[in-house]
Structures are given as structure tokens and as C-alpha cells.
Image (spheres, rainbow, N blue to C red):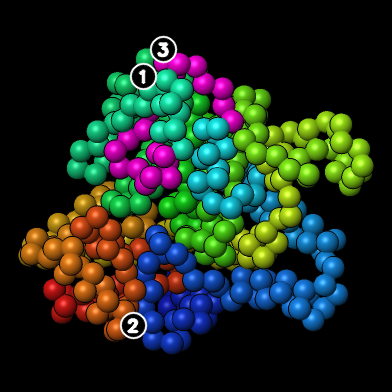
Amino acid sequence: MISSPFDDTELKDLRLLFPLTQSGLVYMNHAAIGPLPTPTYNAVQRCIQVRNSGTVENFEEGMQIIEDTRNRAARYINAPNDEQITFLGNTSDAISAISEGLHWDEGDEIILNTLEFPTNVQPFRRLELLGVVIKYVQAENHTFDVSEIEALITPKTKLISVSAVQYLSGFRADLQAIGNLCSSNNILFVVDAIQALGATPLDVQSCKIDALGTGAHKWLMSPMGIGFLYLSDKMSDLIEPFKTGWLSVEDPWELSEFEKSWLPVNQHLETGTPNLLGISGLGASLKVFEDVGTNNIQQHILHLSGYAIDRLKNKSGINVITSEDASRRMGIVTFSNETTNKNDMDSIIHNLKEDQITISAREGYFRISPHFYNTKEEIDIVINSLFNHL
């Protein structure tokens, strides 16, 4: 099993970043929404304080926060430059920017898979009205191989989109192999990264990703309503903005001059007043990840998810659908109990909350999703309490 990079003292210090750990709450639902670390809370509070009882007008400070956060996001995913990061409201906005912004011809094909969260499906389904064909890899046993994607490729294949980590099973895709496949076939490669970023960094260059979209309220532990989109130069040249606004042009403060040149698409999509609270929080959370070390965070999460699988896999009546192979999972551990139906699960989740334990139930499965401040002892508490309620 993968060991933790943190000793007991280091982990104790990390837990101080999260006041919920001092309250008795055992929180392992980061695949749904993450808590705000204290530095993130403070950054958001700072923005609110300025508007409430400070100078109120804080545009210069706000612009610096935005640029600092853009820089941190670019570094986190190894984007070639900051300008390739566009702040949007959520993953759906990011995926829609691709589906709505590309030119489509009748008969163009998109390859998805049957494990996807609807965010990575519905924006593409609308294109069927234009005659675009969507093909699905029929994922068996909650996983799929790159060869199954390759088998669906034809000369009409224009785009492949995949979640870096699947929301239900926790299956982690081989992004580098898929990226190489797309590159060699001149196919656009899109990644929904919301269940990965925060748990692990992604390298958009080595994985040859053309577009990456994410919300920040899960593993990135930031406010709701903020996320970002990365576009490669190739993708930027191909898409048109699917929305526009007064900040989408050069020299926007020349308010009476309407006939202006449009900004490049990355900047064009930031159409109006930015979500400064959200961006401030995201920037602070990214700094926490930098300070702790992204590789350390990934290793500890894999340590915990591996430990949870080991605890669960030999339990009678339990079916774990998350891979034991660390290269094919990240922080999500999902399992079912053969005697528990959906109504029972809802009741069990409620009872666990009364025990100050938070996990989730999805599609007939229990889902545990620990982060870098959680402990093996907390995994034990969750599993022992869960089995007391089964």
C-alpha cells in the first residue's frame, strides 16, 4: 500500500487549516463539495470586509488578485502561459464554451463514454440537432481502456471528451495515452477535471490536452460558482466565443467607442464583472496546495483511498467498484452492499450525519472521498459507523 508522506506532527498541523476537524465532524465528501481552508476563508472575508467597511472600491487590488490566481492556476496545470486560463462559473460553462464555440458539420463525430457525469454529456448532446453523431464507449466494470476509444475512431471523429476521474467509480483515465491517441489522429482532446484537480495536478502539455474545464468547489476547496477553462493555442484558433460582453473587446473603458477589436477567445469569455470572491478563494486554496506540495497531497490521498479499499474489500456482502490499482484511481472509493436498497441508503446517510460523519450515496453506491487532511483513523470511524448502520 502507498504510504503517507506526512508524519503525525505534519498531519496534525495540516488539520489545523480546517476548523471542522476540531469540531468532531468527520468529513469525507470532497467529491461533492469541499470545506474552505482557513486561508481561503480569510481571503474571501477580506474581500467582503473591503466592500462592507473598508474602501469599497477595490478594483486595483481585485485585478492583482485575479492575475495572481490566474498565474497559480496556469502553474498548477502546467499551461504554457497565464492567458490560456479563463475564469468561468463552473465546469458546465467550460464544456459549453467548447461545444457551442466550435464549428460543426453534419456527420462530425464525438466520442464520450457511459461513465460520465452529465456535465460532460449534455452540452454535446445538443449538437445532435446539427447532425453531429455521439458515440459512447460502453464501459464495463466501471472502467475502460484506451483501445476501446481507439476502436470507435473514424475519419469523421472530431473530438474526444473524458473526465480525468469519474464521479461514481473513481476511475482515473490514462490522459497521456488518450492525448497521444488524439494528437496522432488530429482529434481535439477535452478533459473534465473537476474530480481530479485539488487531489492531483494535471499536465496539459504532456497530456496534449486541447481544453480542460473545472469547477473549484470540490477537491480544489474553493467557493461555489467559480472555475476555469484552459484552451490550447490550437483550440483557441478553432473556437468562437459562445457569449460576449463589454469586457470582451480591446480598450473596454473607451465606453463610447463601440467598433472595437475583439479580444482573443480566452479573454473574450470573461465578459463582465468578475467573481472576485470566488477567484480570491481559489487563489488562496491553490497557494495552500503549493505550500503543502501537490505531490504530497496526491500521495496522501492515494494512501487513504488504498487503505479504505483494503478495509472494505474483504467485508461480506460488499462490492468495491473502485480500482485497487493506484494508477487507475485517486480519492474516490465507491462500493455497494448487497442487502441495502436506495431508500435504506438515504436513511443510512442521514444517520451517519447525526453521528457527525459525512459521506455520500450515488446511483445505488456509497462513496467515500477523503482529502489530504483526513486520517486513517477517520477512515476507520467512517467504515465502523457505516457497518453499525447497515
Left or right of residue 146: residue 189:
right
The residue that label 1 is drawn on is 153
Left or right of residue 179: residue 377:
left
Identify the amino acid type marked 2: Gln
Q: Position of residue 112 (x, y in %)?
A: 36, 33
| 324 in relation to 132, above or below | below
Query: Would you call the spot at circle 1 few (<14 residues within 10 Å), some (14-19), or many (20 or more)?
Result: many
- Name the residue rendered at 73%, 43% in the picture: 245
The residue that label 2 is drawn on is 356
Q: Which quarter shows the C terminus?
A: bottom left
Q: Marks 2 and 1, how far apart in space?
A: 48 Å
- Name the residue rendered at 71%, 45% in the picture: 271
SS category of the residue bearing label 2? loop
Classify residue 1 by image quadrant.
Answer: bottom left
The residue that label 3 is drawn on is 155
Identify the amino acid type marked 3: Pro
Q: Position of residue 375 (x, y in %)?
A: 37, 74
The part of the chain drawn in magenta is 101-122
Query: Would you call the spot at circle 2 few (<14 residues within 10 Å), some (14-19), or many (20 or more)?
Result: some
Identify the amino acid type marked 1: Ile
Classify residue 349 by image quadrant.
Answer: bottom left
Q: Position of residue 387 (x, y in %)?
A: 16, 75
- Name the residue rendered at 59%, 44% in the picture: 229
Q: Position of residue 144 (x, y in %)?
A: 28, 36
Q: Are marks 2 and 1 in contact (CB under 8 Å)?
A: no
- Disc on the earlier residue, 3 or 2: 3
Between 152 and 104, the one lying in front of the other is 104
Q: Which mark is residue 303?
A: none
